[in-house]
Image (spheres, coloured by chain):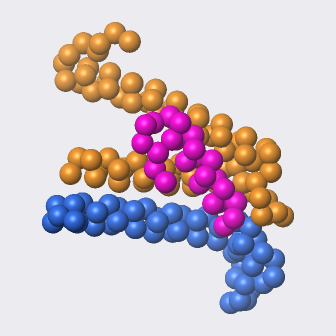
Chain colours: A orange, B blue
Amino acid sequence: MIDEMQTRDSLKMYNRLVERCFSNCVDTFRRKNLDKDEEKCVSKCTEKFLKHSARASLRFNELNAEAAGMPAPPQ
Amino acid sequence: MSEVDRAKALKMAEVEMEYRVDLFTRLSSVCFDKCIDHKYKDGDLNVGENSCVDRCSSKYWQVVGIVGQLLGANQQQPPR
């Protein structure tokens, strides 16, 4: 059950991330292959997103812990 | 194949199918926004729109590959 939900969530996240980075990085359609800059942009977009969500979840957990009346664990 | 295995395989196929449908929906909506003239002068795709959609789909597919690779490198379970 949990396993299936996790697979589902990560596939959803994958699709959303592809859509976001494609929208932000690819704007010209003169060729059918990505050019170097587009490729680089997509890679950086993905890496940045992953780092962003790691940091956001860290902060989110701290806030949650605070709200529950527990001191946030030192990071 | 046992009853349990069969149910599991079916569930996985279902999840996979959902992923494909979601992927197509996104590809199609992004490429529509990027390629189709929103003045809608004509009900047909013109030559430029046709080839734009072809290239857009092809590029989108490549982005799926790149992002998938990076996600796979980052987590142990690479979604494909």
- Image point (39%, 30%), residue name: A57
Q: Which one is nearer the viewer's eye here, A50 or A2? A: A2
The answer to which image quadrant residue A28 occupies is: bottom right
Residue B39 painted magenta: no
Range covered by the magenta-colored residues: B57-80
The answer to which image quadrant residue B42 occupies is: bottom right
In x, y percent, where is residue B78? 46, 45
The answer to which image quadrant residue A23 occupies is: bottom right
Q: Is residue A29 left or right of residue B74?
A: right
In x, y percent, where is residue B26? 54, 64
Residue B36, above or below A8: below
- Residue at the left extreme, as displayed: B3
- Image point (39%, 24%), residue name: A59
Q: Which one is nearer the viewer's eye here, A52 or B10? A: B10
Q: Is residue A55 left or right of residue A33?
A: left
- Image point (57%, 40%), residue name: B70
Magenta stretch: dominant SS? helix
- Residue at the front extreme, as displayed: B1
- Look at the image and tell me whether residue A49 can be seen: no
In x, y percent, where is residue B10? 28, 67
Q: Is residue A49 left or right of residue B42?
A: left
Q: Which one is nearer the viewer's eye here, A65 or B16? A: B16
Residue A43, above or below B62: above
Residue B76 painted magenta: yes
Q: Is residue A9 left or right of residue A65?
A: right
In x, y percent, where is residue A52? 51, 32
- Residue at the top extreme, as displayed: A74
- Residue at the right extreme, as displayed: A30
